[in-house]
Each structure stands twice: as structure tokens, then as C-alpha cells.
Amino acid sequence: MTRPVETPLRQIVGAAVVDSLQHPTRLLVARRTAPPQFAGMWEFPGGKVEAGETCQEALLRELGEELGIEARLGPEIPGPHPQGWPLSAAAAMRVWLAESSAGEAAPLQDHDEVRWVSLGPGEELDALPWIPADRPILVALRAVTARAGDRT
């Protein structure tokens, strides 16, 4: 009996852009304009990895295209799958902490609004209508950022 060959998922990358990699207290979030089922929902900015790119290269490119910023990448927020966090049956997203190093974030592509929100529990971050697949990443993000705060 032969085993089915697993097809790799489409690799997506995302950034949890925080105000400081050392002492994160706020997160930059972006509101989608498309596709229709996600329009008006909030997400981690990012996009697809193109042929010949590493995940980190793709993420830095996407942050420039979507938000007009350059960034320093911090640690990855590890997901439950080898390719990161499941988004659908066909795609998974790897997410890194990032800190803007140049530029002013603006909704240049795929978004109509960006804003900074507190990482604190029970605040604006939780009240936003998030893309459902991103909600588990928020939980992991808070755990990672809490550990960063504990190192001080």
C-alpha cells in the first residue's frame, strides 16, 4: 500500500509589528479590503512568498509594499505546523515579530486602515473583528511578548 505524498501548503508570511522588540506594548494591525469574505477584518500584514525568496525576504518586501516601512525582524512566533499557522486547507503562515526601522506605516496595498493597538488583555485588540485564522496567533503573540517583558 502506498502512502499519499503530502503537498506543501502555499507559504504565506506575516508580521506582528510591535513598537519595540525588547519591550513590546503595542501592535500595528491592518484592515483588509479584499477578498470580499475578509474585507473589513483585521490581520497581521504580510503576503505570499515568491519563487526564489526566503520567508524573511518575502516578509520584508511585503511590509514595504503594503505599509511603506522597513523593519527589523525578531523571533518567529512558532506555529503548530512545520509551515507555521494553518490558514486554510491550502495555505499556512509563518509569523515573525518585527519592529519598524524606517518609514511611517500607511495602508498602501490590500488595506484601508492601519492602527496601533495595545497588547494588553481585554482591550481594543480583542474587540477588533480579526480574520478567524489569525486569532490563535494573537494568543501566541501575547505569550511571546509577555516573556519579552519579563526579561527586563
Image (tube, rainbow, N blue to C red):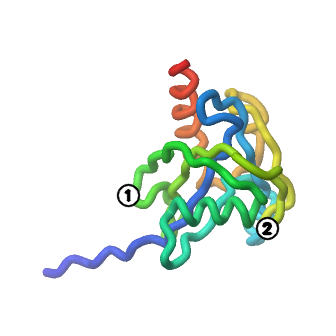
Please tell me whether residue 96 is drawn above or below residue 90 in the rendered image: above
Q: Is residue 29 left or right of residue 55?
A: right
Residue at image x 69%, y 29%?
25
Q: Is residue 15 left or right of residue 111?
A: left
Residue under label 2: 109
Q: Tag 2: residue type?
A: Gln
Q: Residues within 10 Å of mark 1 (few under 14, many from 20)?
A: few
The image shows residue 62 at horizontal and vertical percentages of: 66, 64
Element on which disc 1 rests: loop
Amino acid type at mark 1? Pro
SS for tag 2?
loop
Q: Position of residue 139 (x, y in %)?
A: 57, 38
Q: Residue at x 67, y 40 (%)?
A: 18
Quarter the N terminus occupies: bottom left
The location of residue 53, given as percent across then percent down, is 51, 71
Q: Is residue 82 above or below residue 126?
A: below
Looking at the image, residue 119 sits to the left or right of residue 31; the answer is left
| Viewer-side residue, 97 vs 4 | 97
**Residue at image point 79% right, 52% down:** 103
Outermost residue to the left: 1
Q: Which of 20 and 124 lies nearest the eye of the viewer?
A: 20
Q: How many marks?
A: 2
Q: Quadrant of residue 148?
A: top right
Q: Disc 1 or disc 2, which is closer to the eye?
A: 2
Q: Quadrant of the rendered structure where residue 99 is?
A: top right
For the point 53% across and 39% down, the residue is: 140
In-image side of 4 versus 26 (left or right): left
Residue furthest to the front in view is 102
**Crowd tier of the residue under label 2, counting other residues whose Cα lies within 10 Å: few below 14, some 14–19, many 20 or above:** some
| Residue receiving disc 1 | 82
Horizontal and vertical percent position of residue 27: 71, 40
